[in-house]
Image (cartoon, rainbow, N blue to C red):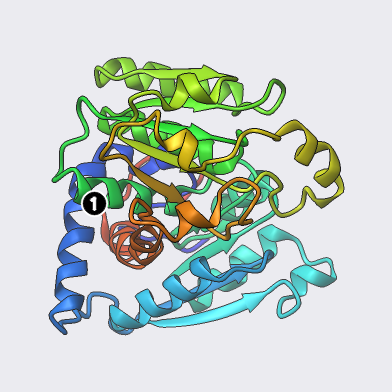
Amino acid sequence: MPTRSVGRDILSVMDYAPDVDRLLRRALALKRDRQRGRRPRTLRDRTLALVFEKPSTRTRTSFEVGVRDLGGAPMYLSAHDLQLGRGETIADTARVLSRYVDGIVYRAFHHADEVELAKWASVPVINALDDLEHPCQIAADLLTMYERWKGKFSGRRLAYIGDGNNVLNSLLLGAAAVGLDVSAASPNGYGPNAGIVQHAQTLARAHHSSITLTDSIEEAVRGADAVYTDVWVSMGEEAETAARTAAFQGYQVNDALLRRAHPDAFVLHDLPAHRGLEITDEVMDGPRAAVWDQAENRLHAQKALLEWALFAPKASRGRGKSR
């Protein structure tokens, strides 16, 4: 298998957590550069394969634009464009793509497939969403809060209302890594991954912050500095729509709920939003919504992640990967 001297995978928030402060500062610098019409060409002559098993608006667009902004060439490949859709193994796909491109951005249905691709690829693999984590989204979320709170997470509290899905899993890890308190409210049976919660709580203690899980939205939101929500039914869960809609009744971010938060609290949503379900039009379109800044920050945060993944010194991942 070909080897490389630099480059690291980003399959989980934990892969970049030790460098999160530096990554956020770099993302903010890249954002300011773009606003001033400057484009550092750090990915010049690099080609990135964007392998997407699931449809996307923000993830695909932000990665394509981000790679081009940095001087590289993105290549979008859906499952229908690859022999993966006709039975070729992930391992064989990884071996072949590694001979052509400088990195792979993979949006997958299953986290195990992310791990398998990274195991056999000899170029960095970036998780653009799977059923366990969404590390690129959380980098943008942290950047949005970093801007609003002027780089200070300590003493702040984020309330999360809704499904204990891949976004919440990664959000718990990301918040713990920066010392941000989190209170997450989900219906019984719809909480986050237990293993990730345990890991995040250990990390939070090391950073002098806390993670609280509850089924009470009032308890979670009371005094919070920011309120985050997400869809009740994620891609791949459509068969559970009726059951989930019933279970999540009342888990809505609306004006009445926000009155329990801090007066300066702002609202986050990773989008797409199902207006009238997990969030109301009044909140989405109101002055407390930070969702559009959050969406834009996908671009800037991912540019920083691309640089980090492709050019950082190689680190041991503990996944038995031979490079």
Residue 229 appears left or right of 264:
right
List x then y, in percent, for residue 152.
16, 37
Which residue is painted at 52% across and 41% down in the image? 253
Q: Is residue 270 visible?
A: no
> What type is the residue that disc 1 sits on?
Leu
Residue under the point 34% across and 21% down: 204
Residue at image point 29% right, 76% down:
43
Q: In the rendering, at what x and y percent does residue 94 appear? A: 60, 64
Q: Tell me where residue 62 sits by quadrant.
A: bottom left
Q: Quadrant of residue 222?
A: top left
Q: Residue at label 1?
A: 23
The one of 20 and 248 positioned closer to us in this rendering? 248
Q: Is residue 135 above or below residue 99?
A: above
Provide residue 81's location: percent of width, then percent of height: 71, 80
Q: Is any atom of residue 54 visible in this view? A: yes
> Relative to 186, does residue 40 appear above or below in the rendering?
below
Q: Identify which residue, 61 or 130, lies in the foreground.
A: 61
Residue 290 % position (x, y) = 35, 55
Q: Nearer the viewer, residue 237 or 121?
A: 237
